[in-house]
Image: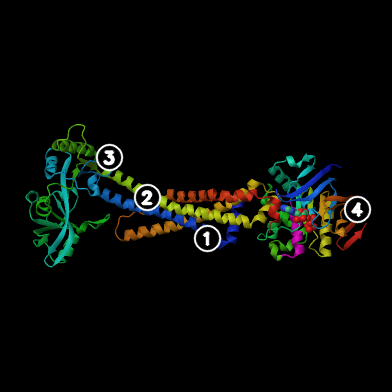
Amino acid sequence: MNIVESVSTSLQTILRTKARSFLTMLGIVIGVMSVIIVLSVGAGAQSLIINQVKSLGSNLVGVLPGNSEDDGPPASAMGIVVTTLKYSDGQAIEKNGCKCIENVAMYVTGNDTVTAGDSNITGTYTGTTANYINVEDANVEFGHFFSEDEEKTAGRVAVLGFGSKDKLFGDEDALGKRIRIGSVNFTVVGVMEERGVSGFQNQDDQLFIPITAAQKLLLGIDYVNYMRMKVDTALNVEQAIDSVKDILRDRHNIATGEADDFSVRSTAQGLDALTSITDALKFFLVAIASLALVVGGFGIMNIMLATVQERTQEIGLRKAIGAKSNQITFQFLIESVVITFLGGAIGIILGALISVIVAKFAQSLGYSWDLVISLNSILLGAGVSIGIGLIFGIIPARRASKLNAIEALRYE
Amino acid sequence: MSKLIEVKDLKKEYGNDEVITKILHGLTFDIDKGEFVSIMGPSGSGKSTLMHILGFLDTLSEGQFLFEGRDVSKLEDDELADMRSSKIGFVFQAFNLLNRSTTLENVMLPLLYTDTPKKERVKRATDLLNQVGLGHRLDYTPNKLSGGEKQRVAIARALVNDPDIIFADEPTGNLDSKSGLQVMKILQDLNEKGHSIILVTHEKYTAEHAKRIIMLKDGLIEYDQPVEHRQIADENGTLIK
Ligand SMILES: Nc1ncnc2c1ncn2[C@@H]1O[C@H](COP(=O)(O)OP(=O)(O)OP(=O)(O)O)[C@@H](O)[C@H]1O
Ligand SMILES: [Mg+2]
């Protein structure tokens, strides 16, 4: 009896007991399905985050306060306030840094009530520099962005994101109108172009004011949260990073051998860090989903043991008419592998379907979510289900092959 | 004639450390190739047990059993399986058909463990089922067959691998006299063609279709002698030769 025949014989056996076979496979179906979904949805979410970072461009360099390992996040990214990075640092980089650095934008952010006439919202505002629009490739739809003068002199001017304008003024014209952030009045000088949802953040719900105004009038701080600078070409990014490090170390009086009190990162490095973080997360989720597979495996073993018990007579007869022990082992192993493989196949199909639905749903909401069902995850699902059939099928199969023919024949 | 089976002082007991049941107390006999032997004895006298030992299904407790001159107790399990597969055909007392497989599949079963191609398996099994008059029942499952039909399926299965030696345990036990005679005719024809046959029965009349009777009693051989008035089965009944 060759393998093709053994498989078709097992299929017949499985079809004869459809309900039981389905219940037997259920654990594997669910396990494989979860693994496929986790891998696919994980990859989709990863693509969402990475697409967002990529959309910033590959020639951006960011500076965060506080030291960090090369591929780990700096302390400031985890919400710890570090105050070492100053407005004057950015100005110095702009003046004395590598010629390849075209613009340096600096940022502080805060939360406060924003009022315009009768409407008020609780919003996040960003204090930034005039060249924000150059660094971020943003465009102003109405009016203009605030000027370098206004940036330096804490001008009380504001530029609204498309969505913020809508919330505060509706259809009315906003230019020249007054808004109040906290208790400070600002004049609206511009409205940004609509940008849509990018990543998890709605870019349109922004509100920009000169960084010095935010520091002095609203937050009462003298440091900046982070800087972003645009380098002329991606090729010069390394050079730009070195020049930023030199200037900052000098300005912060850091002796040779001492660690930086800031972190400089290019988008590429950021991507690497993000990828390794999201990879770890994916791995963790897959590990959890795999538990279902193990549980499913024990289910299979349980039922196969019962099957062996039930089919004692058949096994005895087969041995009596000339089947060798390993032929019996093989038959039962094939049977459990066929069951788990079928379960795996169903799980892959269901998992892929659900992944498609999730991706379509996310895309319909405007997220740049890639549908990723990799060949690898399908092969993994198929391989793991076959493996489970082998591992959990071996004990019942061995038990079947060890049955004594004559005792099995007499067994009623 | 060359010796097929040589048994010396064969003993068999069942049991664990606490209770030991002695079934066979020491049997000695030879069977030549081409013989037709009946093993007789009252119920529980160990006929089936002896047949299982001679068919390599069970092991003896003491004594010696040579098959074609080879000491069976020295053979590996896989060698025994090979011998069962190539040399022996069994008709079990309880038929032991697979209830979820068809008649044809049941008859083909022993060939699964040989390297006979599938086509050949189907052909041999179909031919045999035709011979035992069940050509119109190929795709029936055993639970739809009558007792006599099951018995004939079991016989077809025992013959499918063209065995040198056929063990039949009460092959007429469940049959009316006509079907019983049909079975005996098949066995006698096979014997004419050179197959050795060992028939287990407790009926004197059935046993007399063989050429020799070994009578068991209380775990010993009561007598072992040729059949004087042999019954010959044919389509219409049995003639005394
Ligand atoms: N595994 C076993 N353990 C203990 N005793 C057993 C075992 N198998 C068989 N026996 C006993 O061995 C004796 C002989 O059994 P066997 O089946 O050989 O009898 P038999 O001559 O074929 O009888 P029958 O004509 O009723 O078929 C019986 O008493 C039976 O109870
Ligand atoms: Mg018996």
A241 shown above or below B123: above
A76 shown above or below A302: above
Residue displayed at 63% across by 58% down:
A310
Residue A88: % across, % down:
11, 43
Label 2 resides on the chain identified as: A
Q: Which residue is mark 2?
A: A282
Label 4 resides on the chain identified as: B
> CA–CA distance between discs 2 and 1?
29 Å
Range covered by the magenta-colored residues: B145-160
Can residue B122 be seen in the rendering of this structure?
A: no
Q: Which residue is mark 1?
A: A23
Amino acid type of the residue tagged 3 in the rendering: Asp
Residue displayed at 54% across by 55% down:
A300
Label 3 resides on the chain identified as: A
Report whether mark 2 lies on the same chain as mark 1. yes
Residue A130: % across, % down:
12, 50
Query: Which numbered dot is residue B227?
Result: 4
Q: Does the CB distance between marks 4 and 1 fall below 8 Å?
A: no
